[in-house]
Each structure stands twice: as structure tokens, then as C-alpha cells.
Image: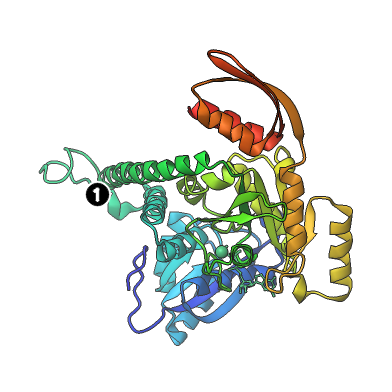
Amino acid sequence: MTSEFGYETKSGPTRTLVIYPSLRGRWRRERDDDRGLEEASALARAIELDIVAEEIISLREPKPGLYLGSGQVEELHNYIEEEEIELVFMDTTLTPVQQRNLEKALDAKVIDRTGLILDIFGARAATREGVLQVEMAALSYQRSRLVKSWTHLERQRGGLGAVGGPGESQLEIDRRLIDDKLSRLKNDLADVVRMREQHRGARRKVPYPIVALVGYTNAGKSTLFNRLTGAKVYADDKVFATLDPTMRGIDLPSGRRVILSDTVGFISDLPTTLVAAFRATLEEVIEADIMVHVRDMSDPDCESQAGDVFAVLDELGIDAADCSDRMIEAHNKIDRLDGEDLDRINATVERRDDAIAISAITGKGVEELLDLLDRRLWQNRQVVDLTIPVTDGKALSFLYRHGEVLERQDGDENVVVKVGIEEIDLARFRKMDLAG
Ligand SMILES: Nc1nc2c(ncn2[C@@H]2O[C@H](COP(=O)(O)OP(=O)(O)OP(=O)(O)O)[C@@H](O)[C@H]2O)c(=O)[nH]1
Ligand SMILES: [Mg+2]
């Protein structure tokens, strides 16, 4: 098997060393080191790398050349030789120069956080859209790695005119090849997205509100999705178990129907290129009427994970402060908690009207969650006057189905109705109206 980044597995899974750099001062990361290392290993396990060892390496600041100190590199090199390590995963962002220097100095393939996440996504992508998105993200990443300091790429190839124009450097050729491929991918993706849009358009005509599950990877979104829909979406104790979005209709206790969507999990330092590539897929989230933020309350990193989720939402153009009216929190995995921890969570959700404590595994709290969705989605009934062309039977039937028609005057061209209708249905109606 050859991965996106070309490291090969000769016999069985790649022997891997996981390194979590622990930095000081302004470089310090939010997570404590042990948790950071744990997550790093979870990432490595997500593509079934064979983790031979995992290590926290302390340093004051990243060194421009090798990232690590020269003493540390030497020590690592010995270890790598002894243990026949094939791959070193450095859970940080390496510059192309650092990556190349480290590979030379350690005599092993080196991959950084973005590289590994791209690899995981590459291995997971199942739909054509997913595959294209990951390919695009990986290529953009590679393009950003093509820098001048890769002297072997800089050799002038001009003169003979075999490849590229006269004087065009290898670097320029590589860039151009990648750009060509990128624009081809972009077109392919646009085709796929257009097809999906048509499906989505069809879905919009069945005007049910969309409820999107969002949250950190491994928080339990798919498990909750399965519980609520009776579906059998792949859920696993693996980061990024879900890559492709899944949608299903469910009925809330009020009998009203919503569409629930399960999506890719978020993670800290999710590469921007990847967020951009997945933007189309995440459209369901961006346009959702309500987001349910699923949180793993049994994870000590829960708070910083929530921060990471908001950071990714922000990149998608969703402002946390703006969207509080369409966001509720499912404090998940409470079956794993007891004593003070459980008391604290119960007290929190008691105080807040936008949070429910649940266990997606045992089902505890799930009914309350559905009730809250009901309340949230249908709480703002308004009475409005609407003028509808008599020819627009679809609009009228929508109003009869979703609202309460209080008065009606039939004219030659228009019907004027006074309707009691929920704000959310009204918004939906107006959207439909615009769409024709
Ligand atoms: N104890 C316990 N485990 C849970 C609960 N909900 C989910 N899990 C477990 O947590 C792991 C991750 O669950 P998933 O549903 O795959 O998480 P996800 O948020 O969909 O993860 P990604 O798709 O990777 O983003 C699985 O092993 C689940 O069995 C819960 O309420 N209690
Ligand atoms: Mg999932």
C-alpha cells in the first residue's frame, strides 16, 4: 500500500514513532502534554500505523532547521535505527525544510499533523465527492510544500525545451502541473456538487428543517445519529470514523419531521485546505436550522475541544456569537461519569436552556434532547399576511400543511391569506418562494 505521501508498508503496518513536541512560552499549546500525546496516537491509529513508541519531547521553541535540537535528533536517530522505525509522526506543523532535514537526519519518513490528517481522510473517503475533496486538499498541501529551498527542484530545465518553456525551473513546472491537476479536480468536483445540489433542491422542496450534528471527532455523533434514526452508520472508537455526510428523516415527539445530518468530525488544527475542500459537504451544517453540538464530557480535553469546534465553524463562516439561537449542546457519554463530575454536568444543563446531558449509548437523556429540538424549532409562531398568485398551488398547500390559515380572500390573480405560522416554516416558505 502506498499512501498519499508515498510511505510504503513493506510487510504489514508501518512501524511508527509518535512524537508530541511540548513547547514553552508563546509556543505552548492549550492541551496538556499527556492528552496531546494521546490524541496524536489516536490519529496515528486511525490509519492503522503500528505505533512502536510514543514520546513527548520538550523544547523551548522550534528550531528553524530541524525543528528539534541536534542532541534530540541524534538520540532519536539511534532509537530509530535500533527499532527499525519507518515513519516518524511529528504532531505539529513542520515547514517543508524542517520535514526534509528531519527525514535526512533521522533516516526515516517524517510526516506532520496536516500530512497525517490528509492521509486519514484519503484512506476514508468513500464517495466520489469525498475522494475529490481529499485529493484537492492533498494537492494544495503539496503545492504549498514546493518551495525554493528544495534545491533539487530548482535545477533549470530550460534550453532543450523538452519539458516546460525555456528557463522554466523545475519548481515552476511542478507548480504548473499541480495547478493543472487542481483545476481539473475543481471541475470534476463542481460536477459532482451540482448533482448533489439537485438532490438537495429536491430535499428543500420537502421542506423539513435540517438538524446537523457537529462536534469534535469521536464525540459520539454517529452513535447518536444511529440511535435517533435507527440507522447503522459506521461508528467506531477511531478519529474521523465519519467522512461523508449522511442524512435521514426523523420524527420529533410533536410528530413534526426534521432531517438529521451526521458529518465529519472536527479536530484542532484541522488543515485550512481541508476545511475549504469540505465546504460543499459541510453545506448541510452551514445551512442547518439547528446545530447539535455533541460533546464528549468524559474527555478531560472537553473544553478545548469545544473551542476547536468553534474555530472550525468560524472558518466555515459560522460565527459562534451569532448562531447561539440555532445551536444546542448534547453533553454526551455521561454513562462514563459519576460522582462530582456527573453532578457538575447535571447542574450545568439544569441551569442552561440550551444543553441536555445524554448518553448516546444507553439512550439516557435522548428523549429530552428531542423535546428540546421541538421547542427550539417551533417556538415563534407569527401571524402574517401573504399574497400568493392563484397559480401557485404549491405555495398554498405548503401554508395549509405547515401553518394555520386564519383568513383567506380569493381574488382573480392573487389569494390573500392570513396565516399563523412558525418563524422557521415561514423562513422556509420564503426560501421556497424565491426558488420558484
Ligand atoms: N460510553 C459511551 N461511549 C460512547 C457514547 N457515544 C459514543 N460513544 C463511543 O465513542 C466512540 C466514537 O463514537 P462515534 O459515534 O463514532 O463518534 P463520532 O463523533 O461520529 O466520531 P467521528 O465520526 O470520528 O467524528 C465509539 O466507540 C462509541 O461507541 C456514549 O454515550 N457513551
Ligand atoms: Mg462519526
In percent of the image, x 42 and y 84: which residue is there? 84
Across and down, in percent, residue 108 comes to: 41, 73
Asked if 41 appears above or below 182 in the picture, the reply is below
Q: Quadrant of residue 287?
A: top right
- With respect to residue 321, does 90 lie above or below? below
Snapshot quadrant of residue 81: bottom left
Pick out the residue farthest to the bottom: 82
- Place residue 82 in its image quadrant: bottom left
Residue type indicated by callout 1: Arg
Q: Nearer the viewer, residue 81 or 110?
A: 110
| Residue located 59% across and 32% down the image | 429
- Residue 261: x and y, percent? 57, 54
Which quarter shows the N terminus? bottom left
Where does the image place residue 56, in percent across and percent down from the top left? 63, 73
* Ligand 1 picture quarter: bottom right
Q: Which residue is mark 1?
A: 155
Q: Residue at x 47, y 58 (%)?
A: 244
Number of callouts in the render? 1
Is label 1 in a helix, a strand or a loop? loop
Q: Residue furthest top?
A: 412
Residue at the spot 74% in from the left edge and 41% down from the top edge: 325
Q: Is residue 138 above or below residue 169?
A: below
In this picture, is 295 found above or below 80?
A: above
Colouring style: rainbow
- Drawn side of residue 19 relative to residue 36, left or right: left
Q: Is residue 303 visible?
A: no
